[in-house]
Amino acid sequence: MLLKPSFVKTVMISGLTKGVARYNDLIKQVYGVVFIATPHNGAELANLAKAVKFLLRTNEQVGDLTLHNAHLRSLHQQFLARYNEFPFSVRTFEERNPVSLDKGFFGNLISKVVVDPASSEPHVPNEIAIPLAENHFSICKPKSRDAQIHKSLIAFIQEVKKKVPQQEITNRLENKTQIKSEVKAMQSLIDLMQEKLVHLEKAFVLETNASVKFQLKNEIAELQQEIEKKKR
């Protein structure tokens, strides 16, 4: 599941400190989190982009990523303070290559690492960011399965799988099987209802009695509504 890092942190903190049940339930099902070029303390480039936004045409959200942004810093501090209560592992990747911004007459005058090493380092116990020779855009788009980030992620997933209780894996597989069975049963019911609908529509066309025709029209409308409800 791909999620915005600040959202992940907010969900976890809210689940632990604000008693949000649905968030707390979600946390219990998380066993691994990967940060890829994540600006835990903001990005210096966002400061520059904000300063010349009239030229670069950036949006207001850029201000939320400025270096040493109070909200990002506070959110990450809360995340670290509560980390020991989280049952998951963390893997971090940081970019090392700069991005060149081509903006008309500016050419490639601006060439900078978007998220510097200091900000991409989460400072999670027993975790150090893995530096990659990629820029902010190429780091999340591996060219092949042989790319370092792809191999590392596969290894991380295998490592995390070992921490998931076998009973939970069994339960999830059983739930998945049950869901598939329920979906199949529901589809069979919808198919039968659609067959009945076709039969009623044919009967409606052939019927000449106004009273019976009116009754058939109502039955068709009700059946159509039921089919739509089942599809949802």
Image: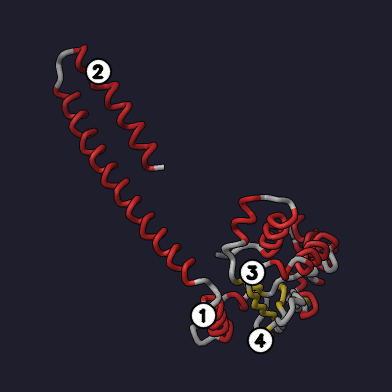
Which residue sits at x=75%, y=55%?
A: 17
Q: Residues within 10 Å of mark 3 (few under 14, many from 20)?
A: some
Q: Residues within 10 Å of mark 4 (few under 14, many from 20)?
A: few
**Foreground label between 3 and 1:** 3
Residue 142, visible in the rendered structure: no
Instruction: Name the spot of residue 130 as percent of width and height, x first.
Output: 67, 84
Q: Secondary structure at mark 4?
A: loop
Instruction: Name the residue beneath numbered marker 4.
Output: 133
Instruction: Name the residue beneath numbered marker 3.
Output: 87
Q: Quadrant location of residue 173?
A: bottom left
Could you tell which of marks 2 and 3 lies nearer the N-terminus? 3
Distance from Cα at disc 2 to Cα at disc 4: 72 Å
Q: In the displayed structure, does residue 157 sit left or right of residue 217? A: right
Instruction: Name the spot of residue 160 as percent of width and height, x first.
Output: 56, 76
Could you tell which of marks 4 and 3 lies nearer the N-terminus? 3
User: In the rendered image of this protein, does residue 36 appear above or below residue 51?
Assistant: below
Which residue sits at x=41%, y=58%?
A: 175
Q: In the displayed structure, does residue 138 sit left or right of residue 158? A: right
Could you tell which of marks 4 and 1 lies nearer the N-terminus? 4
Picture quarter with the C terminus: top left
Q: Residues within 10 Å of mark 2 (few under 14, many from 20)?
A: few
Nearer to us in this view, 222 or 31: 31
